[in-house]
Amino acid sequence: REPSFFTGWLLLISMALLVMLNVRKKFSFMPFGKVRNWLKFHIYVGWFVVAIFLFHIKFKVPNGYLELIMSALFIVTIISGVVGIWMSRSFAQRLTRYGEEVIFERIPIFRAQLAEQADELARRSVGETESTSIADFYAGRLKMWFSEPRDYFQHLINSNRKLYELEQELDNLRRHLNAAEQEYSDELRLLIQTKHKLDYHYALQATLKGWLFVHIPLTYPLLILAVLHLVLVHVYTGAAL
């Protein structure tokens, strides 16, 4: 029999195994082994699938609309998987080096608390220093910055440019402040640094979670098309399933 029959069935079975990782995550409470081990298995099978796919198409560009669509979907899925592996490892190391781990779902709560603290600090500075220097700087440069996640792409490329700019502006302002105002500027600096770290965690974790909404949805239509392709091959060749 044509080797493509064997490699085709092997591809279908292997892709079904790849989908099992997502199923395992949905039933994480079940004693089916650690998710970490399932992930390793998923990666190894993924590379195996790439090799089998190349043998299946005989290292040629497929002909036929269904085969071309399947191949394009397969390539995009594999690329998204490779990117996901790289991000998972790289981002995990970066997050570990960048301070205490923050639970993604709690980041909006922490951000709102920081915004309240910064707002309260600006109001107190007016009453206790009888100057609006800190409050004006906060209102003009920081109020909107504290209100929502910022500098998403800068954090992805590990750039601290925005933090450096804000600290430079605060340093320039500090030269013209009295002793009491300088204490408030130091407190504000700590809040800025904390917000920067929070945005860093948000950017990397949001990207990791968002990647799953690209990679996983691609696998199911690919699996459906693979089943359809297999059925059509057996129907038109007269081979039994």
Image (cartoon, rainbow, N blue to C red):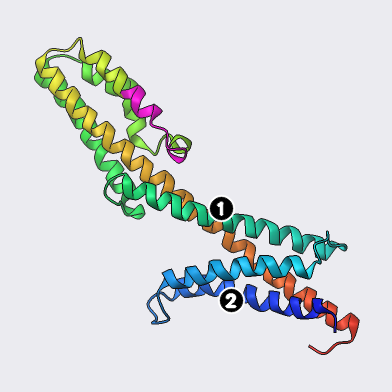
Quadrant in which residue 73 is drawn? bottom right
> Residue 152 appears at what percent x and percent y?
45, 38
Image point 69% across, 58% down: which residue?
75
Between 42 and 181, which is closer to the camera in this rendering?
A: 42
Give the spatial CA distance, label 2 vs label 1: 20 Å
Which quarter shows the C terminus? Answer: bottom right
Residue most extreme to the top: 176
> Where does the N terminus fall, quadrant-wise?
bottom right
Q: Main secondary structure of the magenta part?
A: helix
- The type of residue carrying mark 2 is Leu
157 is within the stretch colored magenta: yes
Q: Which span is picked out in magenta?
A: 155-166
Question: Is 111 a magenta residue?
Answer: no
**Circle number at residue 83:** 1
Residue depicted at 84% across the width and 62% down the height: 62
Q: Nearer the viewer, residue 37 or 186?
A: 37
Residue 140, x across and y down, in percent:
33, 20
Asked if marks 2 and 1 touch (Cβ < 8 Å), the reply is: no
Q: Residue furthest bottom?
A: 240
What residue lies at 25% left-to-right and 17% top-to-bottom? 171
Give the left or right position of residue 83, taking residue 158 as reference.
Answer: right
Q: Badge 2: few (under 14), some or many (20 or more) residues near its Cα, within 10 Å?
A: some
Q: Is residue 219 above or below residue 119?
A: below
Numbered disc 2: secondary structure: helix
Q: Amino acid at mark 1?
A: Val
Q: Would residue 180 be found to the left or right of residue 234 on screen?
A: left
Q: Which residue is mark 2?
A: 17
Horizontally, is 236 left or right of 135 in the view?
right
Badge 1 marks a residue whose secondary structure is helix
